[in-house]
Amino acid sequence: MPETAAVSIRNLSKSFDGTEVLRDVSLEVQPGEVVSILGSSGSGKSTLLRCINWLEQPDRGDIRIDGDRIGVSDTGKPMSRRELAGMRARLGMVFQGFNLWPHLSVLRNVTEAPIHVQGLSKAEAEERAMALLEKVGMADKREQYPYTLSGGQKQRVAIARALAMQPKVMLFDEPTSALDPELVGEVLGVIKDLSKEGYTMVLVTHEMEFARAVSDQVVFLDKGIIIEKSHPSEFFENPKTDRVRRFLEIEAPTVPTV
Amino acid sequence: MSNWDILWSSYDVFLSGFYNTLKLFGLSAVLAFLMGSGMVFLLEGSRPRLKIPLRIFIDGMRMLPFLILAYLLYYGLPSAGIRMSAWTAGIIALVIYHGAYFAEILRGCRATFAQGQVEAAIAQGFSQPKMFLRIILPQLILKTRGLLGNQLIILLKDTAFLVIITVRELTAAASSLSSTYFIPMEAFIVVIGFYWLISIGLELFIKMIGRFGAKRGFENA
Amino acid sequence: MDSGAWGLLIQGAWTTLWISGISIAIGVVMGLLIALLRVAKIPVLHQLLGVYISLARATPLVTLVLFIFLTAPTMGVNLNRNVAGIIALTLNTTAFNAEIWRSAFNNFSKEQREAALAIGMTPWVYFRRIMLPQITITSLPGLVNEMSFLIKGSPAIAVIGVVDLTRVTNRISAVTYDPLPPILAAAALYMLIISLLVWLQRVAERKASRLAV
């Protein structure tokens, strides 16, 4: 094992109204690694991702980002809002529904947190934002407002917005599920580029072929339990369990990879 | 001398009334809006502690005539040992009363707000106050601008009630001029014109915000 | 507060209610008529009514009450205080009601008219039997809401000496030297009246939403 894991999840459990959605989940993500979380809907995969940046609070277990525990401070008490905000700023999150802020232009969506959370000057934040918008191919739309953009364009801006905080880890929560099929490719293309650049990423997705192409590790969740954790080639060609085999048969690749 | 000449000779009375009304309106509009936004901020979070008291306060104000609140502050409170000038009582009444209405307008809109945007801000490490100020409040204003504008006009009109508790505002000016020179028609036409003017100005201001909002895809509320 | 004070208070409440009630009744009907005239877009009249609505909505009730009460004698009309109050409240609420009715007309679907004329209804029968009943139901929540606003504005008539539910508190405290209890009692009575209207508005909203489906 190399130095500190970028994300380390140990014995995580979470229930909603008495229903256990995550049961004793453990997972390590090494720096530079891309991990895909697969599973049918209701398997708990989005909840797992949302626990990583404490949008959901797990009932048991602990999560460390770069060795530092999130949600619980050194004294064992729940983190203050301020401490939590500091931890969250190390994680970039991309949502299924984009969640851009409609009253701000594309550029301001990207600069807002660097200026008002990290305390960057406007000029620094804009320089950083323009480089990222360039990277996701949205630089020419910087003055537009979100409602004028297509879903794919919105998601690319959302990716730039998350990257602008220079996070240690990027979390993707079904980033293409809300997109029309013809727009999926442009977003997956951007994520694939990021994986080549060595970003550490955890993604929840339904795009099997894509997961196979970009992941270093594939995790399969079923009813809140990790039942397989393996290299993509092994996972897709030689699944260990019947459950995964059945899942792969149903989830035939829908969209060609980029 | 015609009636209008008499009026013109006392234009300073109108001007000071106009100025007082504008001052009452401007000051209490700003404070009431801050108070309303503050109450909505206190209602943020999953289990706000002040939810029930704020609900009672807001609903209570919405069931009262403005004048009875002004009466309470100006005539009623001295029996409890709290004395203030008519002007102070008037401003406080305007702020409390319309603060509650502003809070209700903003709260109603906040309840329909997409949770995803708030999560995006939390995930980026925004603190609660910064998120409210930079992400939530600007959108609430853009979405409710029509209702906020109506409320501002109601606030403007409620300043006239203060003549009854002896505040020297615009309506008081018309009233005193008309009784001094017995020219009520002309005096009140001028004053109603003033109110009309401010209302039209407010409507233009709201339209301006509307253009600002339309550019961002916010439809008319 | 003794029973005499309560008696005065109830009288004040009654004055508020009957003066507001008459104004509301006239205002709802006049509002409908003005909305119809506005929908017809008759030149000049359309603009004149527009100016009236804009002016009436911008003028504070207190100012309007004073204007009417003080101006009438200069034109040789001696107005009773109550009548002056009713005129002012009516002029005010009519303007708001006209806009409520008008927006209901503007939002009414045109297809129903074609369907009615196609089966041989005259325009009047169509208006009376098809359009008006639906428009009344969709306007009702707004109209009831405006009734609350009128009650909340009605203390304006105190300025010309009508002893309504607000002004009566001065009269009681002139005797008892303690204004706080009558003011609080009056506030409670206002809350009772308004909460009744708020309840009515909810019922009306439920009816209106059933129509929308």
Image (cartoon, rainbow, N blue to C red):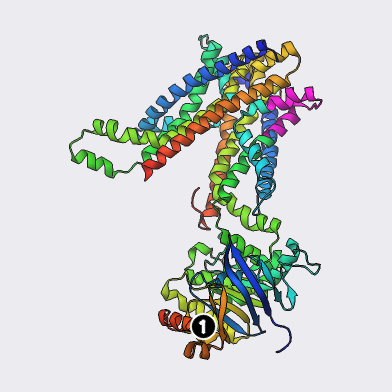
Tell me if mark 1 has few (under 14), some (14-19) or many (20+) residues whose alpha carbon lies within 10 angstroms of its own: many
In the displayed structure, would residue B178 be above or below residue C127? above
In the displayed structure, would residue A32 be above or below residue A187? below
Q: Chain of mark 1?
A: A
> For this rendering, which residue is in front, C185 or A74?
A74
Q: Position of C164 compared to C30: left or right?
A: right
Q: Which image quadrant is residue C159 in?
A: top right
Q: Which residue is located at x 60 percent, y 34 percent? A: B62
Q: Is residue A104 visible in the rendered structure shown here?
A: no
Q: Is residue A204 visible in the rendered structure shown here?
A: yes
> Looking at the rendering, in which quadrant would you find the N terminus of chain C?
top right
Residue bearing mark 1 = A211
Where residue C44 sits in the image (x, y, percent)? 38, 31
Q: Main secondary structure of the magenta part?
A: helix
In the displayed structure, would residue A6 be above or below residue A158? below
Which residue range is magenta in the image? B70-94
